[in-house]
Amino acid sequence: MTAFEVPDIVIGRLPIYLRALNLLFEAGQEFTSSQELGQKLGIGSAQIRKDLSHFGEFGKQGTGYEINYLREQISKILHVDREWAVALVGFGDLGQAIAHYGGFASKGFHIEAIFDNDPAKVGQKTNGKEVHDIKNLAKIVAKLKIKMAIIAVPASAAQTVSDILIEAGIRAILNYAPITLTVPESVQVQYIDPVVHLQRMTYYLV
Amino acid sequence: MTAFEVPDIVIGRLPIYLRALNLLFEAGQEFTSSQELGQKLGIGSAQIRKDLSHFGEFGKQGTGYEINYLREQISKILHVDREWAVALVGFGDLGQAIAHYGGFASKGFHIEAIFDNDPAKVGQKTNGKEVHDIKNLAKIVAKLKIKMAIIAVPASAAQTVSDILIEAGIRAILNYAPITLTVPESVQVQYIDPVVHLQRMTYYLV
């Protein structure tokens, strides 16, 4: 980490701040404070001020943060002030649910290409997108300049799919398969495994 | 935190260790080491040894960890050596996908009651479970002694649903609604919001 690099844990909190600011904005509120945000998010107000101070001076003494300005600034910092094309690999039950989920597109993440290796699924259409043979992944990902992908294949296939994606130029992977992927340091990976979250909570239940 | 309490961040890594151990076990492997686990998980081997040392002495000099023994021990620590009943609130697209997902039951988490407030959904059946009116939640959750719940309702309804669940005795919530919940300290909450994960990664993509 260089001197000017922001810790990854801070980056991880920015989407949470953005989500809360968007909700306040949609509710018609104009200003907020680190105290109000902190209370809503269960995060200390000093932590919020320190996190944001990595990127500039966003608040004003007395009035606090202007919600619309702050959400625009955080969107820019996170590079979500633009549209992103996303590849989806796996068109089983989970992949289909992901393809139909409206929450990605509304936040600027568009599933532009879907892949599977099952001949019965290749050629199917969903939301106007065709399911392609995974053999054509490299060609299509390059043509559409896609940098992000979602993996929704069984655990046993996930590492192979990850290797294919990275070879094709993908630099960020959201992995729904319940397995930790081995990737180069230059590639981002995030995980969604609801069982892991449930198991973390049962520790506290007797 | 008392002197004997294990940091929550350590608890959060145990399900990841368990997942890796289960995969190795299913592949027929008998022994592993903190080095091998660390390499698979992108976690330092010293960190893994330190995490596990909170709970006892599981490895042997020379042979390392016996996989089956260690996964049994971690299962006990996490209280996932038993079956858990789970309530699901929300039977829209997401709730239906969750109800059909086989990955919960195979890990001992059984959706025993489903709730919605939409008269068109109440009375529907899935996997032999009926969708109940949310008005009957307290009664049913108490009768079935359910302590865990999954929220799959729109963000605008999630806090109200959370309050109802906690009032009914729920002590752990997996929240799929894209909003941070306000809950008492005695209640566990974990979040699943794929957009948050995508936005965290786009920071690193230019």
Image: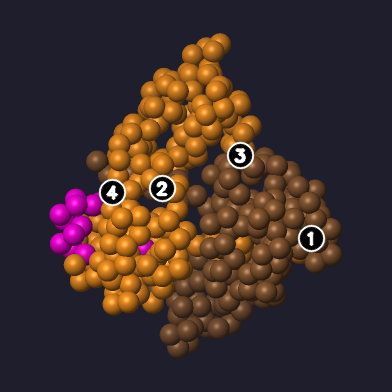
Chain colours: A brown, B orange
Q: Residue A27: percent from the left, percent from the top?
A: 43, 85
- Amino acid residing under circle 1: Val
- Amino acid residing under circle 2: Phe
Q: Residue at x 20, y 71 (%)?
A: B135
The secondary structure type at the circle numbered 3 is helix
Q: Same chain for labels 3 and 4? Say yes or no.
A: no
Q: CA distance from mark 3 to mark 4?
A: 28 Å
| Mark 1 neighbour density, 10 Å: few (under 14) some (14–19) many (20 or more) | many
The secondary structure type at the circle numbered 1 is helix
Q: CA distance from mark 4 to mark 1?
A: 42 Å
| Mark 3 neighbour density, 10 Å: few (under 14) some (14–19) many (20 or more) | few
Q: Residue at x 57, y 27 (%)?
A: B27
Figure quadrant of residue A84: bottom right
Of the image marks 2 and 4, the number of the one nearer the N terminus: 4
Q: Which mark is residue B87?
A: none
Instruction: Look at mark 4 in the image and give the residue it sits on.
Output: B85
- Amino acid residing under circle 4: Ala
| Mark 2 neighbour density, 10 Å: few (under 14) some (14–19) many (20 or more) | some
Q: CA distance from mark 3 to mark 2?
A: 18 Å
Figure quadrant of residue B173: bottom left
Q: CA distance from mark 1 to mark 3?
A: 23 Å
The secondary structure type at the circle numbered 2 is loop
Instruction: Look at mark 2 in the image and give the residue it sits on.
Output: B104
Instruction: Look at mark 3 in the image and give the residue it sits on.
Output: A156
Report whether B67 appears left or right of A185. Answer: left
Q: Which mark is residue A141?
A: 1
Residue B55 among those drawn in magenta? no
Magenta-colored span: B137-151
Instruction: Name the subunit of mark 2.
Output: B
| Mark 4 neighbour density, 10 Å: few (under 14) some (14–19) many (20 or more) | some
Instruction: Name the subunit of mark 3.
Output: A
